[in-house]
Amino acid sequence: MNICDFGTTLKSLRKSHNLTQKELGLQLGLSKAVISKYENGLGYPTFDTLIQIANYFSVTTDYLLGVAKNKTIDVSDLNESQIETIQRIISEFNRANKQ
């Protein structure tokens, strides 16, 4: 695990959602300064805040911390048939990427 990846990952997620540090801070109940500290590796969130950030961006805490490279896919609102279709598509992509 490389905790240094957290700030880079957070910044990337924030930018991909077209948010400023201030806007993200408002969404999470944090100040712009705290978001800046996180992104620059000068501070790290508590476990509760880490979970809140992961939930906000719909990623895992492992992804935020650089433990896992993959994001998650929320299938909670899909029916079984739709989930199976997505699993088949992912399998096809994985198979094609291994070739």
Image: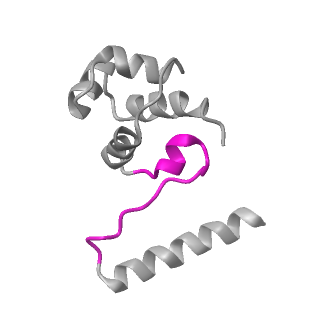
- Total marks placed: 0
Q: Position of residue 69 (x, y in %)?
A: 60, 49
The residue lying toward the viewer, choosing from 78 and 49, is 49
Residue 25 x %, y %: 27, 25
Of residues 78 and 6, the one nearer the viewer is 6
The residue sitting at 45% across, 24% down in the picture is 38
Q: From the viewer's perspective, is residue 72 above or below residue 26?
A: below
Q: Examine the rendered structure and indicate whether residue 40 appears above or below residue 66.
A: above
57 lies left or right of 28: right
Q: Which residues are magenta?
A: 59-78
The percent coordinates of residue 36 (x first, y second) are 41, 17
Report the residue that reaches farthest toward the bottom: 81
For the residue pair 70 and 94, the one nearer the viewer reads as 70
Our reading of the magenta stretch's main secondary structure is: loop
Q: Magenta segment: does it hold 67? A: yes
Query: What is the image's colouring?
Result: one colour
Could you say where residue 32 lies in the image, as x and y percent from the top left?
Answer: 30, 16
Extreme-right residue of the structure: 99
In the rendered image, the vertical position of residue 99 relative to residue 72, given as above or below: below
Quadrant of image for the C terminus: bottom right
Q: Residue at x 25, y 33 (%)?
A: 28
Please tell me in which quadrant of the rendered image residue 65 appears.
Answer: top right
Point out the image quarter for the N terminus. Answer: top right
Is residue 70 located in the magenta-colored stretch of the structure?
A: yes
Q: Which residue sits at x=50%, y=42%?
A: 64
**Residue at 61% from the left image edge and 73% from the top image edge:** 92
The answer to whether residue 26 is left or right of residue 86 is: left
